[in-house]
Image (tube, rainbow, N blue to C red):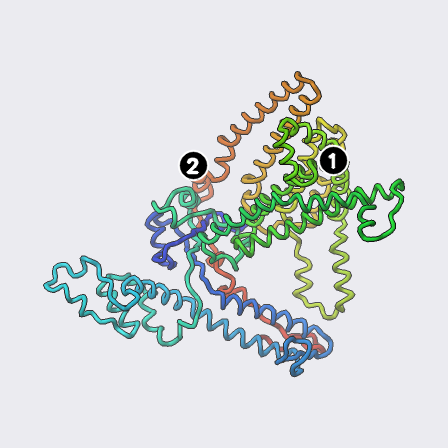
Amino acid sequence: DEDVPKEFRYSILCEQVPEWLQSEKRLKKYFDRLFPEKVAQTTICMEMSCLDKLVEEREKVLNNLERADACAHHPKVSIGGRCSCCWGEKVDAIEHYRTELSRLNTSICHERELVPLAANHVRHQRKLSRIFSSNGALNVPENLFSGRKHSSEANNFKQPTDLSSLIECNESHFSFSDDDEERDIGEHINQIDINESKISPSSTAFVTFTSLRAKQAAAQCALTPDRTSMRVFHAPDPRSVLWENISFPLSMQDTAKFGMKVVWIVGILFWAIPVSVVNSLANLNSILQALNIKTVDSSKPWYGFLSGLLPVIALALLLDALYALIVLTAKRVLKLKSLSDVDAYATYWYQLYQFANLWLIVIGGSIFNQFQSFLNDPQSIVTTIANAMIGSSVFFVNMTLTQSIGKCALDISQLQKFVIALLMRLWRSESTITQRQMDRAKIPETYQWGYEIPQILFILMIVVLYCPIVPIMEVFGLIYFAGRYITYKHQFLHVNAQTFEGGGNATWLSIFVFIISIIYMAEAVFIAYMGLKQSPASAAFGFVPLVVTFVFHLDLRYKTITYLQNLPLQRAAAIDVKEGECSDFNRLIYLQPSLNTCLDEQFHVVDSNTRGPDAVF
């Protein structure tokens, strides 16, 4: 794909990089030793929350300055108060934001100058912590004074007070590396107070190779015998990287994933409570009685339509809130490092809750009450589920039709976005809209696969499960998938655009498993239902597709899916021979945006009379 950066194809993501390798030069030498002349560049991700906050604050000030300049009159802003609209002293907004922008630019430049010095400083402090104990005593290796007359020389060693002399002394005694970047620390350590900076190298790094064969070998092989260090993954698309999470340690991320897994599993067990509330909305008169409102005639046509529609809408809103919570957890709690990882995580858990929705709606009531009845009479499990599925078919028909008509119509018409844009125009005059806001409005949206795919699979599960029980469900399923096909075809060709490449992470690792699970469940329901209908021949025949599905599943798993997760080295070598090794790379592609000066924007002050730029900041 020409739109995908080629660095994405040749790069890996290294996690848990050891402290002694948290330098771009050292990391490059390390990989050069493993893959000689195949390493294009290495990028160590930095922990620099202060710089990130300054860049974010500058973005806000720049937006405010553009909005103030777009106004026909000279707006005022309050300073010294609790908010910018009231209290405090009123000053000219443009001049105030110019001053703030200049201050932030100076602070950002200062922090950027600290980055290489702070990184070296942190590495030297780590070296010193290994040399000197907490009480200042020297940690002397056993063989350091071997061959000397008096081993008491170690006790006479005095710790230098000057850091540069300390480094020089330690290099002569302990054979530290003599890299140029480490020697520069002695020259610059007194110019800038590094201790005030909260900048340090992290355990995350990107490595770009010139050969696809070397990249695949690095991604598929164990680089070290220690499983807790140098864990390698395929690099995410640089356009999908969540840079605010990039320096979060992988070990802490794994711990957070385990904790959230427990939370989501417990949430599935208690998911019956909100589902029961949704089911109760089908009885409209009971809700009116609870609100002390006069009941209506349930024989009226609109009553049945509204009673069937309310639970569907309520369940859709509940699931939308659940999806937003899952995505928020992935970004803020787990701190996943790319949007493709967020999509895969949301797809997995959102689909599990969709599965829980089906069976909780079918069984009805509290799941704990059902468990108790099943324990009292285990033979009633199949009978209870079969009878409940027939009773719940009306709800699923309403849901399928609502998704077929309502969602497809909203997606094609973009009605909700039009309403939001109309309200924004009524609230804000057109003259105050900046060029940046108009440019952002033209950017096409990206489809959220973690939200769309589980809904499609949920309807597929309903249609497949209800085929032997309510055959007319196939007709409603045909309407739904025909409508979604038309909608997606129109959206992908004319409206939406995928801004990043996920590498099939959300597709092959989750969706295939869910589709096979749906097929297994459908075949099990068919066998059980035929057994209840006292049709042993039909029930026995149902085992044939079950066995065929199982064999097909194993064949795909061991012959196809396993090899799709990684590009075989033989195929990678053939691509290198055909296309040649690549050496022309964008060196800034995996550089953190806060350090990339090419992304810095300049503000053009526009004169209201001539509408021409008269100053640049």
Using a 10 Å C-alpha cutoff, classify the residue at mark 1 as few (fewer than 14 neighbours), some (14 to 19) or many (20 or more).
some
**Residue at 49% over, 60% down:** 592
Q: Residue furthest front?
A: 376
Q: Can see residue 583?
A: no
- Residue type at mark 1 is Ser
From the viewer's side, name the closer residue of 8 and 467.
467
Q: Could you tell me which secondary element the residue under label 1 belongs to?
A: loop
Residue pictured at 67% horizontal, 38% vertical: 358
Q: Where residue 343 sits in the image (x, y, percent)?
A: 58, 48
User: Residue 538, percent across and down?
Assistant: 67, 18
Earlier residue among tags 2 and 1: 1
Screen quadrant of the C terminus: bottom right
Which quadrant would residue 63 be assigned to in this image?
Answer: bottom right
Residue named by callout 2? 570
Q: Which residue is mark 1?
A: 392
* Residue 76 % position (x, y): 68, 79
